[in-house]
Image (cartoon, rainbow, N blue to C red):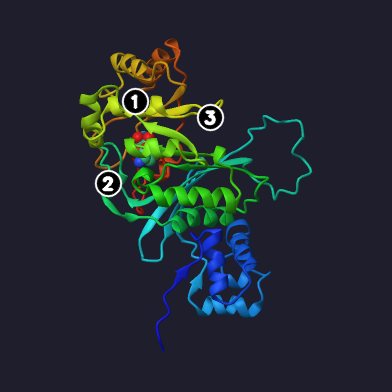
Amino acid sequence: MSEVKERSLLGLTLQELTCVAEEAGQASYRGQQIFEGIYRRRVESPEQISNLPQPFRGALVEAGFSVGLPGIEKKFVSTDGTVRYLMALADGQSVETVWMPEGDGGEAGDGSEAGIEEENRAWNRATICVSSQVGCAVDCQFCLTALLGVKRNLTAGEIVGQICALLNEQHVLLPQDRVNIVFMGMGEPFLNYDNFMKAVRLLVEGVGIAESRMTVSTAGIVPRVYDFGSEPVRPKLAISLNASNDELRSRLMPINRKWNLEKLMAAARDFPLRPRERLTFEYVLLSEVNDSAQNAREAVELVRGLRAKVNLIALNPGPDIAFETPSEERILQFQKILIAAGVPAFVRRPRGRDIFAACGQLKRTVELQTI
Ligand code: SAH
């Protein structure tokens, strides 16, 4: 018996799926039905694409096709409701995907949501943080993922698959449930640009998540920032600034030696924003390293004139990370300087720190030590 190579349907475009159907001697529109089955209805196996004729479903399986959803290997639930998932990929590698629900906190309070049969959900909006690579090559000194190095790029199917697996696990109904996607998990999306962008298009056209609900964060891969600006369909852009001058940034983020602040900020200035769109800059605050009043003033100069906001993230600590989280007072002082200079600045609440799910903590940590 010849060995059948497993092929996953997730990651294939409508056109590619149409070819799969045609090569199997089926009508072209069967491609559309597979597309809807795997992305919109998020089936788990070809047998579940119920509008395909049974023999064709069998033939797909016979030919080695599977949907290709990653398996949920482990999950860790935080006291704040965040869930960190360890997703198993076909080759034995794994990545992490994080689910961050937001309760309605009773704000609505007017019963407007009542009457919807909603199995008593604890959330009315959620954000999924997705990985783009196994590990990361960028080597930011404050990030745990960097310690893994980069193992490989994820395929478009593996990127979309993380999201579909989570949407299924959380019983999300689209389009009515509000879900945001952030490409801010393990890896540098702009070093896996083509697969990342292919995944974006499949999410928009197939899964049904608007690109306006997606944000990608880059450590500053400048040529890809330009490419990204010319994409007809694209998420919002966030740039990890993390330092206010080149000397400091090169120390914290070695990638700055290749594309320094002048090049990065030029790309940010040239970036074609849509009406009402803003750029986001992330700034990880490291106590007594990049969080002084002088650093804040330098950061103001960098972003001056840009339609942008700054998200301040207090360092999420981790083993082998040689930095400390600043005091609340220093964080607020930094924020105050930005705001006084007219730069919108927000202090991001850490999510899932207790389970190593917060920014910079994704390292497939399985043993949970207290920190
Ligand atoms: N590689 C991309 C995507 C990762 S996003 C990028 O660098 O932008 C992760 C965000 O978390 C980045 O803004 C990064 O600067 C930030 N981060 C990394 N390590 C962190 C840590 N230990 N504490 C807080 N934020 C961290």
Residue picked out by circle 2: 137
Q: Which residue is mark 3?
A: 274
Q: Residue furthest bottom?
A: 1
Q: Which residue is mark 1?
A: 266
Nearer to us in this view, 244 or 284: 244
Please state the horizontal and vertical placement of residue 312, each as a whole percent of the image: 40, 26
Q: Quadrant of residue 108?
A: top right
Q: Secondary structure at mark 2?
A: loop
Q: Which mark is residue 212?
A: none
N-terminal label among 1 and 2: 2
Amino acid type at mark 2: Ala
Question: What's the residue at 25%, 32% (across, down)?
Answer: 256
The percent coordinates of residue 132 (x first, y second) are: 40, 49
**In this orientation, which residue lies closer to the viewer: 1 or 78?**
1
Q: Name the spot of residue 192 as percent of width and height, x first.
A: 36, 49
Does the numbered disc 1 mark a residue whose Cβ is under 8 Å from ligand 1? no
User: What residue is drawn where x is 69% and y is 47%?
Assistant: 120
Query: Residue 303: where, in percent of width, then height?
Result: 38, 20
